[in-house]
Image (cartoon, rainbow, N blue to C red):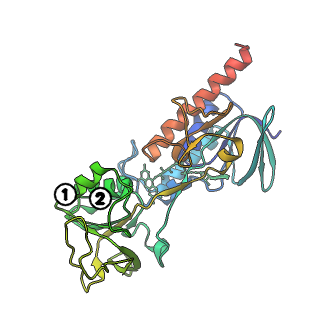
């Protein structure tokens, strides 16, 4: 009974939506996911998912899981440790072995964290990992963005449409990994100030984030002229910056171990998919944050999940009819 038409690895919005579609196409489907709801469960408040103008990530997870269960799809809270492709896929978790004709990889990604004390405690209380999701909370406030790549710069530009002041805090002395267009836009933006050669040493604030303490990285130190891009920053006490919010945009790490094992092609560790969510390996599909899609959000994960569920159904029908 451990044999399925389709096994979906990952129980975030991408995997759960793929399950809804596959179940409604009457496929025999199983979801295996370590954490029900995935990253979506960590979202303090979701305001950009159509249907709800405001809902907690926790509530959204509950609703999606309920919908999948109503369709009689089982969700196993197990970790996939190994996978092999033969006539069928053989999937090994810590507890069981499963078999499937097709698989969808929906293992998402992990945001890189700052690695400073109290980070977990202040997440959602002034500390954020997604400007697209949470910029709207900072109208006329002062915010910081950590990072120096495209994600950090575009986040700062987006935040500048809401906040009265945006600091970009970066450990190097210039932006070397960002597109020149974003660097130019940032330099022109009067609301944005740059703090180079600096790392965050401490998060300040009791119930919520109220500021940061910086430590110099390299030279010049943060107490001197910290900016080689032509803007100067005055830091309170030389080292502390008062903030209402801080956005960490230092990249993410995709869950690509399964894809690697199967020889799936990747770009910068994200799975390359075609418009049907197919990969270069027959029978292997991928959806959501683990793919090379440009917008890592719940709604896009759901959209890709739907396409993957549909494509698997079409392929199985075609194979059954022998065409
Ligand atoms: C703090 C925060 C706030 C956010 N706010 C918003 C927001 O307001 N709006 C928005 O649209 N997006 C938001 N996002 C982004 C959103 O959560 C993600 O884009 C979305 O969850 C991606 O869905 P996914 O299904 O691709 O991956 P994930 O949600 O990451 O799910 C991955 C799933 O795979 C499982 N998995 C991984 N490896 C294995 C394995 N080896 N075996 C078994 N299971 C495995 C995980 O346990 C999980 O179930 C936010 C993210 C964060 C971190």
Viewport quadrant of the C terminus: top right
Query: x%, y% of residue 257?
Result: 66, 51
Query: x%, y% of residue 129?
Result: 42, 61
Q: Residue furthest left?
A: 190
Name which residue lies at 78% across and 49% down: 92
Element type at mark 2: helix
Res 87 → quadrant: top right
Crowdedness near tag 2: few (<14), some (14–19) or many (≥20) residues, C-alpha within 10 Å: many
Lateral position of residue 132 relative to residue 13, left or right: left
In this rendering, is residue 27 above or below 258?
above
Lateral position of residue 218 relative to residue 141, left or right: right
Pointer 2 with pointer 1, Cβ within 8 A: yes
Name which residue lies at 69% across and 54% down: 77
Residue pointed to by mark 1? 189
Element type at mark 1: loop
Viewport quadrant of the N terminus: top right
Residue pointed to by mark 2? 156
């Amino acid at each position: 009974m451990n044999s399925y038409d389709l096994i979906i690895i990952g129980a975030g919005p991408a995997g759960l939506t793929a399950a809804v579609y596959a179940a409604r196409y009457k496929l025999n489907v199983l979801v295996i996911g370590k954490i029900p709801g995935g990253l979506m469960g960590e979202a303090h408040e979701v305001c950009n998912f159509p249907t709800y103008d405001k809902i907690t990530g926790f509530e959204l997870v509950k609703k999606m899981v309920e919908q999948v269960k109503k369709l009689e799809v089982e969700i196993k809270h197990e970790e996939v440790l190994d996978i092999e492709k033969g006539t069928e896929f053989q999937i090994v978790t810590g507890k069981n072995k499963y078999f499937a004709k097709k698989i969808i990889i929906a293992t998402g990604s992990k945001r890189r964290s700052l690695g400073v004390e109290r980070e977990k405690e202040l997440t959602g209380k002034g500390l954020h990992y997604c400007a697209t999701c949470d910029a709207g909370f900072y109208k006329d406030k002062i915010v910081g963005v950590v990072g120096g790549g495209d994600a950090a710069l575009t986040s700062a530009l987006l935040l500048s449409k809401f906040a009265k002041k945006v600091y970009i805090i970066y450990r190097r002395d210039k932006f070397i990994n960002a597109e020149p267009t974003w660097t130019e836009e940032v330099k022109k933006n009067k609301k944005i100030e740059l703090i180079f050669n600096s790392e965050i040493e401490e998060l300040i604030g009791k119930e919520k984030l109220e500021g940061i303490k910086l430590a110099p990285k390299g030279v010049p130190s943060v107490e001197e002229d910290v900016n080689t891009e032509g803007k100067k920053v005055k830091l309170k006490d030389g080292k502390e910056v008062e903030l209402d919010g801080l956005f960490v945009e230092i990249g993410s790490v995709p869950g690509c171990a399964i894809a690697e094992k199967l020889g799936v092609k990747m770009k910068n560790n994200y799975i390359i998919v075609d418009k049907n969510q197919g990969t270069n390996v027959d029978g292997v599909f991928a959806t959501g944050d683990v793919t090379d899609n440009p917008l890592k959000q719940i709604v896009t994960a759901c959209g890709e999940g739907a396409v993957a569920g549909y494509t698997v159904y079409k392929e199985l029908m075609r194979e059954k009819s022998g065409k």
